[in-house]
Image (cartoon, grey):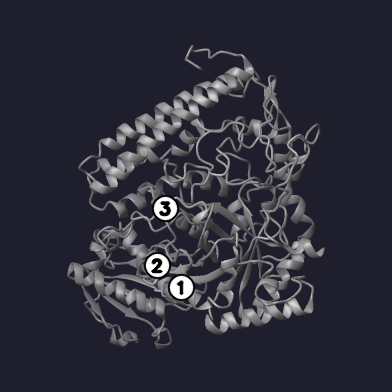
Amino acid sequence: MTATPAMEHPAWLPPAAFEAVGRQTIEIDVPRSLGDSPVLASLRREIEVATREYGGAASPGPAGADRRDQSTTLRFEFDDSLRVPGSYTLASTPAITIVAAGDANGLLYGWFAVVRVGESAFGENRPAQTFIPATGTRMLDHWYNVDVHPVLGQVERGYSGGALWFEAGHLRDELSRVGRYARLLASVGINHVCVNNVNVHPTETTLLTTRLDWVVRLADIFRAWGIATHVAVNFESPVALGGLTTSDPCDAGVRAWWAETTRRVYDAIPDFGGYVVKADSEGQPGPFAYGRSHADGANCLAAALAPFGGTVHWRAFVYNHRQDWRDRHTDRARAAYDHFTPLDGQFADNVMLQVKFGPLDFQVREPLSPLLAAMPRTRVGIELQVTQEYTGQQRHIYYLPEQWHEVLDWRPWAGDDTIADIATGSARAGEVPSRPGLDAGIIGVSNAGADEFWTGHPLAQANLYGFGRLAWDPSLRPAAILDEWSSLTFPGADPLVPRTLRSVMLGSRQIYEDYTAPLGVCFMVTPGVHYGPSVDGYEYSPWGTYHFADRDGIGVDRTRATGSGYTGQYHRPWTDIYESLAGCPDELLLFFHHVPYDHVLRGGKTVVQHVYDTHFAGVAAVERMRANWRGLAGLVDAALFARVDELLDEQVRCAGEWRDQLTTYFWRHSGIPDAQGRPLY
């Protein structure tokens, strides 16, 4: 409900979404101890703006049940029985709707929940229902560079314009938009952000020292919306910033430097969240240079943060990026498991190992990382990528909650426990944690930037919204999340609008997979930029080899019997399912096995015919998406309609390029024509 510039889209919080709550007489009744909370001040502003716009009333709401306003129709009150931070209860009678929480964050989340429910939150009996966040860490990492990097730009893997708070080596003078962004994040329950790139370039290291005032300003903004601020740090900071001759994590001087530097940070930002670290990965420095382990490195920083309650997010994205492409046994997919499982139980309690959902790198289709289920004595957070690095770069429609739901619902053991149970610290079957109750987390790489639509592609806003909702409650269904988002973003729209959004977004993950890399093959993308097809682009590079295509077949042998042995990193039944050529799911066949082009899939088609059919079908599906979208002309905002329409033209063009290159490649390698006689060039 805060005012926005004419060229800034309100995303899922347009003024019209607040009409139902804005008509109410609203009271806040909380103890005086919460009275000066900046989060509570944000809630009061929300109420004031909404009621002023739609004719309701904001009661002062003094503490004490005996002084409550009898005309109140929506009341926010304190309930100290709700002990999980951020949780809230929602209940209503025909006369009054009540939101109760044990802290200010919970009251704010309850406010946005009432907005989501809309008109049906009022005037009817609703039994009390308590909403508890599944995990205490619901975090977005922002790959924002302080300086404009010559290759990566202002935002690494950013497809939504520049950074929201950095601009060409400076903190932006005008930060009001950061406040509106924080409000969007709070509305879906995000409670942690990292403000700079995990690939920490030299300028970023000074965010701990001479530019700490920048972080202070950002933390002040995020704090008002219940969000803790983190900074990504370079492991060599003691040398780069402190003038030391070593950054050895076991050196007393190094540990003292981190302790003193961290103390100064907390003096300036008492609720600072902690550090994010990418070490010994893709050229970033780390403890290996000193003969130390990742646990040694992480625990050094953890010791500095522990007195203040801070957390180290230590990324597990560690592998050899100087491989020999001729070596069929060095397997990048194995690397994280091989590096980290020997260290299980050695990390301090305030270290969270941040693990990408797949063993490679946010691919369209890859199995779940076995590391997620291999460290029962370690806090493990799952990392998802909201920015669409390998999934269309916010130029293609790809509704990511479909992928994430599949990820979070996967069962790594024979029992009922899921990846969501691991990410929320509640896994019990399979391997019972010896330190149960450790807070875990769900972390995403943000897709937001300075673009007027926040996310480049207006419909990619649904991915940011969906990440927050799934981080709060991993059991939510993708279709239900989409319906929530569309009803908020397009309130009161013609019924054709939500129906069309369903038709173009649900199933878009499968459509994108159909016209891009097939059957679990990874990295068939243009090197560096990662957009558009380049079948052999990475095949002979030091970053890894991903399909081993020749005249006889295609795919990577990762079996224990004849390949890299990667299948042995899984628990049963998956280690046996993936090992077996007959049992391996079709969609992952080429990730685990090298097979002839005429190998018959479990679905009945040969590999090569599957490639032909899916790539032609994928292009046809995108053409239908575009036609369906064009049926909304005049029914949605003109600028938004035009942006989506333009991007759908690009998606159709790019899908056709993928189809032509992939089908031609498979035909030339296999010599097998398309059974339907379509042109393969």
Q: CA distance from mark 1 to mark 3?
A: 20 Å
Horizontal side of residue 259 vs 513, given as left or right: right
Which residue of the protein is positioned furthest toward the front in this rendering?
150
Q: CA distance from mark 2 to mark 1?
A: 8 Å
Residue 504 figure quarter: top left
Kind of residue sitting beneath label 3: Ser
Residue located at (55% from left, 52% from top): 384
Horizontal side of residue 310 vs 651, given as left or right: right
SS for tag 3? loop
Residue 281 figure quarter: bottom right
SS for tag 2? helix
Kindly identify which residue carries mark 3. 160
User: With respect to residue 355, does 630 lie above or below?
Assistant: above
Of the numbered discs 2 and 3, the one sitting upstream in the chain is: 3
Dot 3: within a 10 Å radius of its alpha carbon, few (fewer than 14), some, or many (20 or more) residues? Answer: many
Kind of residue sitting beneath label 1: Leu
SS for tag 1? helix
Horizontal side of residue 128 vs 233, given as left or right: left
Circle 2/circle 1 CB separation < 8 Å: yes
Circle 2/circle 3 CB separation < 8 Å: no
Query: Which x, y percent locates residue 321?
Result: 70, 47
Kindly identify which residue carries mark 2. 178
Kindly identify which residue carries mark 1. 218
